[in-house]
């Protein structure tokens, strides 16, 4: 036993494990590598010891490995909605010594942490927009250029500068088209522009643009020429656009004005679960506006119990069910029950902010 221990101690130390980043390409390949220079036009990597380059427009995502403890702790704070701690740690991580790719990535996450904070506290929106602007000035040729421009526009919209945000998003959509980037980028920018108009009380403008955009997304999502890896993203954007169009109709003419649209979505078997759930919620909202609170309650309860919708849509259903229960004298359950479920299960949704206010928090 002693001799075996001595032999083990005498063996040379194992070579350090190389950094393992992952490039996800639009053609579906996942490339394990070490990213050296994440440029917008060209991403330079080391793959199995050899320097290799990839066209930036063919890179869908980069997952960085081997990040320092401070960066991982910052991600934990952000997930827990401890925004101040997250923003501070991301900023500190970007100034620490380490990999050459670290400052840009940590700086971007710092701006994104401020943006997440701004969704709960609009007073932080200008801080987030400024952080993205600083990042873009520092790293104008980075692979995450589009991501930063999208973040800046979202922060600008949250600050209340609707027209400025819309201009930024129009420029981003044109940029994506001119650079022949994936259609999902152009569509995301155009869809965000519609959301900006909606939040800025310009429902008529949002509706007009969505009537053009939604069919276009649907066509590209179903095209055999669309890379398979992009289809789930495009279907998600389609559902988001379909919901936004219904919201625009309701914002423009009242809940009843969107009834025929929501009923049409429910009849369409090709519509995804999020849009199906949102259509039922829209009909429940129309019923409430007509004084039919009990009917609305049953529709919302059915959505929550049977439709596999995403967090934002499910949070909307829970919030409205809480309100309907309050209207019916907290029968058969107190509205607070649904507000608490919303906050517990969907804390990052925009509806959680309103639910916390209902709960007195």
Image (cartoon, rainbow, N blue to C red):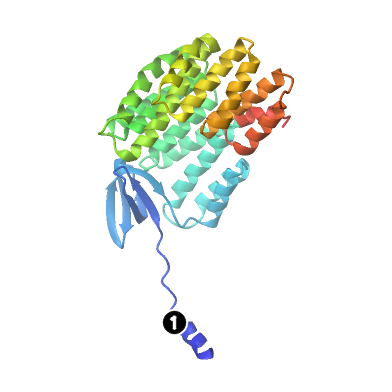
Picture mark count: 1
Up/down of 9 relative to 99, above or below: below
Q: Residue at image x 40%, y 27%? A: 238
> In which quarter of the view is residue 207 placed?
top left
Residue 3 percent coordinates (x, y): 50, 90
Q: Nearer the viewer, residue 295 or 248?
A: 295
User: Quick check: can you spot residue 276?
Assistant: yes
Q: Is residue 246 above or below residue 3?
A: above
Q: Where 166 falls versus 9 (above or below)?
A: above
Viewer-proximal residue among 96 and 242: 242
What residue is pinned by disc 1?
11
Q: Secondary structure at mark 1?
A: loop
Q: Position of residue 295 (x, y in %)?
A: 61, 17
**Residue beneath the point at 52% across and 18% down:** 200
Q: Residue at x 38, y 16 (%)?
A: 211
The residue under the point 36% across, 49% down is 23
Q: Position of residue 99 (x, y in %)?
A: 43, 56
Residue that protrudes farthest toward the left in the picture: 225
Left or right of residue 89: residue 153: left
Would you place residue 109 above or below residue 12 in this image?
A: above
Image x and y of residue 230, in percent: 34, 37
Task: In this rendered view, identify the residue nearer to me: 294 or 347.
Answer: 294
Q: Is residue 337 left or right of residue 200?
A: right
Question: Dot 1: within a 10 Å radius of its alpha carbon, few (fewer than 14), some, or many (20 or more) residues?
Answer: few
Q: Quadrant of the C terminus?
A: top right
Residue 126 seen in render? no
């Amino acid at each position: 036993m002693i001799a075996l221990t001595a032999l083990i101690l005498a063996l040379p130390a194992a070579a350090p494990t190389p950094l393992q980043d992952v490039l996800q390409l639009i053609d579906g390949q996942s490339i394990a590598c070490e990213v050296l220079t994440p440029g917008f036009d060209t991403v330079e990597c080391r793959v199995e010891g050899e320097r290799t380059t990839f066209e930036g427009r063919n890179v869908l995502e980069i997952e960085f490995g081997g990040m320092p403890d401070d960066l991982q702790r910052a991600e934990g704070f952000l997930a827990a909605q401890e925004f101040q701690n997250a923003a501070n740690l991301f900023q500190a991580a970007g100034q620490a010594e380490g990999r050459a790719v670290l400052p840009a990535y940590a700086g971007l996450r710092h701006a994104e942490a401020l943006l997440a904070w701004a969704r709960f506290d609009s007073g932080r929106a200008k801080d987030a927009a400024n952080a993205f602007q600083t990042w873009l000035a520092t790293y104008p040729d980075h692979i995450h250029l589009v991501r930063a421009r999208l973040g800046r526009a979202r922060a600008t919209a949250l600050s209340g500068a609707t027209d400025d945000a819309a201009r930024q998003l129009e420029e981003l959509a044109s940029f994506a088209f001119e650079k022949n980037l994936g259609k999902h980028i152009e569509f995301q920018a155009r869809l965000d522009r519609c959301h900006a108009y909606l939040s800025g009380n310009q429902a008529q403008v949002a509706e007009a643009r969505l009537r053009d955009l939604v069919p276009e997304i649907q066509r590209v999502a179903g095209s055999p020429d669309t890379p398979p890896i992009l289809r789930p993203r495009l279907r998600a954007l389609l559902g988001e656009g379909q919901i936004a169009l219904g919201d625009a109709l309701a914002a423009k003419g009242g809940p009843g004005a969107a009834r025929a649209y929501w009923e049409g979505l429910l009849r369409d078997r090709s519509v995804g679960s999020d849009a199906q759930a949102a259509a039922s919620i829209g009909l429940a909202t129309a019923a409430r506006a007509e004084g039919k609170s009990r009917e609305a309650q049953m529709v919302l309860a059915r959505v929550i119990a049977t439709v596999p919708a995403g967090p934002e849509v499910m949070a909307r259903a829970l919030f409205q069910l809480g309100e309907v229960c309050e209207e019916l004298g907290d029968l058969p359950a107190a509205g607070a029950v649904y507000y608490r479920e919303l906050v517990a299960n969907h804390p990052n949704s925009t509806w959680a902010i309103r639910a916390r206010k209902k709960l007195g928090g």
